[in-house]
Amino acid sequence: MNLAVLKVEPERKRILLSERQYYRIIEKQKQEELKKKLKETKEPARVNLGDILNKELSKLKELTELEEE
């Protein structure tokens, strides 16, 4: 189990931990790394709507083929 330390209270001998916060921190770090990589390329990410639709249609086709079997 992965946990983030939120608060330490030595006088009360308590440590406040959070699993949810740990994963939020990890996700934030991944987003920052992605932003950094995008800045290094200095070229905006280009998204083609046709490519997105083709990927989604192929997923749908695979699902319908699995259901038919």
Image: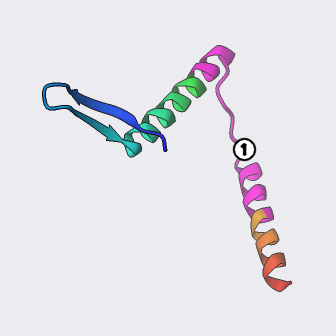
Relative depth, front residue between 28 and 46: 28
Residue 50 among magenta residues: yes
Is 59 situated left or right of 43 in this image? right
Is 42 situated left or right of 3 in this image? right
| Residue 69 higher or lower than 9, as above or below | below
Relative depth, front residue between 32 and 23: 23
**What residue sits right under mark 1 in the picture?**
48
Q: Position of residue 41 (x, y in %)?
A: 68, 17
Q: Position of residue 52 (x, y in %)?
A: 72, 52
Quadrant of the drawing holding the C terminus: bottom right
Count residues near mark 1 (Cα–Cα under 10 Å), then give few for <14, some for 14-19, many for 20+.
Answer: few
The type of residue carrying mark 1 is: Asn
Element type where label 1 sits in the image: loop
Specify the principal SS of the magenta part: helix
Relative depth, front residue between 11 and 32: 11
Is 28 situated left or right of 66 in this image? left
Q: Which residues are magenta?
A: 36-58
- Which residue is pictured at 81% across the width and 71% down the height? 61
| Residue 57 higher or lower than 22, as above or below | below
- Which residue is pictured at 76% across the width and 64% down the height? 59
Is 13 situated left or right of 37 in this image? left
Q: Position of residue 58 (x, y in %)?
A: 80, 63
- Which residue is pictured at 14% across the width and 32% down the height? 12
Coloring applied to the structure: rainbow
Q: Quadrant of residue 46?
A: top right
